Image (spheres, rainbow, N blue to C red):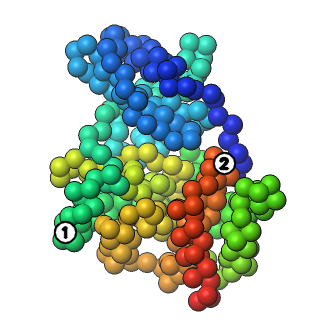
């Protein structure tokens, strides 16, 4: 992972819809009858394309170099080991004169994100815990995939987790200081990061023994529910890593409603410094996202800063 601002390919929705139809017709050899935007973020946007005979797939555009290749690789890798459904990659396509944005096609996933599933969010504790158990057990199976080296799934090359993570964390801190000088990050955030960095060797004093496959972005926006069926989507920066790196996202948004982190740690164990590490991982990841995309979301960032400061008081 490189902590730097990503330059994206311009892509308006009208053009993207046309390109989605073109990519589908090239793949399926059928005419696209309907194209609907499913939404997206800073670097990707997805469209559901339906043919005249009712067949549908999702075409996703990745607006930054090499992101499509990485996401396709990780989806295929994770799908092999995840007991819950994940999108199946149908094709991938490098940008060219015809479609000037990298894209890939995948199967349509039924359901909606847990974040927007009010019936799930407001259901009884027993039902919410049952949902949490399914999610946690599936993630643990993914974590059961091990590698001899730590690092990016496409090229794991580090002997220890800190050989990979510590240089990345320092890079994020250095870049964050630059962004504070430009007025893109507050002094409060930087001061918290500097204090946490001084405690790095304490926070990460326990050795991570296993290089486990992780999803990288398993928050409740990327967990779909349709009836009793649960699916995972949208991995981000999947790695062979400390398995606890996957847990800080569980407490973001309304993840605590499903007791995800609590269930995982009780069933599958935790390191002695787990709370401290999750606070560090969460803050550093969010600052990394601000650096990459240029968008700061206070209702996500502020609790992470508060939690890191709370943990620092105990060190």
- Residue 127 position by quadrant: bottom left
Question: Badge 2: few (under 14), some or many (20 or more) residues near its Cα, within 10 Å?
Answer: some
- Residue 165 position by quadrant: bottom right
Circle 2 residue: 294
Taking 190 as reference, is 215 left or right?
left
Residue 174, position as x, y percentages in the image:
78, 61
Seen in the picture, residue 208 relative to 246 is either above or below; the reply is below
Q: Which mark is residue 124?
A: 1
Seen in the picture, residue 180 relative to 16 is either above or below; the reply is below
Residue 204 visible within the image = yes
Seen in the picture, residue 14 relative to 179 is either above or below; the reply is above
Taking 228 as reference, is 97 left or right?
right
Residue 178, position as x, y percentages in the image:
80, 57
Taking 155 as reference, is 235 left or right?
left
Taking 160 as reference, is 71 left or right?
left
The residue under the point 56% across, 12% down is: 98
The residue under the point 43% across, 45% down is: 234
Residue placed farthest to the bottom in the image?
Answer: 314
């Amino acid at each position: 992972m490189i902590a730097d601002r990503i330059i994206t390919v311009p892509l308006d929705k009208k053009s993207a819809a046309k390109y989605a139809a073109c990519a589908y017709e090239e793949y399926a050899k059928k005419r696209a009858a309907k194209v609907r935007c499913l939404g997206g973020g800073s670097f990707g946007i997805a469209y559901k394309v339906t043919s005249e005979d009712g067949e549908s797939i999702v075409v996703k555009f990745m607006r930054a170099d090499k992101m499509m290749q990485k996401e396709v690789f990780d989806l295929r890798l994770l799908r092999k080991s995840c007991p819950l459904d994940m999108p199946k990659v149908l094709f991938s396509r490098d940008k060219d004169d015809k479609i000037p944005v990298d894209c890939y096609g995948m199967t349509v996933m039924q359901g909606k994100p847990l974040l927007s599933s009010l019936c799930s969010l407001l259901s009884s504790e027993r039902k919410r815990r049952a949902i949490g158990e399914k999610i946690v057990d599936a993630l643990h199976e993914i974590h059961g995939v091990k590698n001899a080296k730590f690092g990016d799934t496409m090229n794991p090359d580090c002997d220890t987790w800190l050989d990979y993570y510590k240089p990345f964390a320092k890079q994020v801190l250095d870049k964050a200081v630059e962004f504070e000088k430009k007025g893109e990050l507050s002094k409060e955030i930087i001061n918290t990061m500097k204090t946490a960095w001084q405690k790095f060797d304490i926070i990460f004093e326990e050795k991570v023994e296993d290089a486990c496959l992780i999803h990288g972005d398993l928050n409740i926006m990327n967990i779909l529910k349709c009836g009793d069926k649960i699916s995972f989507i949208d991995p981000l920066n999947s790695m062979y890593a400390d398995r606890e790196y996957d847990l800080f996202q569980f407490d973001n948004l309304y993840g605590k409603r499903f007791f995800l982190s609590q269930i995982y740690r009780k069933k599958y164990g935790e390191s002695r410094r787990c709370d401290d590490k999750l606070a560090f991982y969460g803050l550093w990841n969010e600052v990394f996202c601000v650096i990459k995309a240029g968008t700061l979301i206070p209702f996500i960032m502020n609790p992470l800063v508060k939690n890191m400061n709370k943990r620092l008081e105990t060190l």
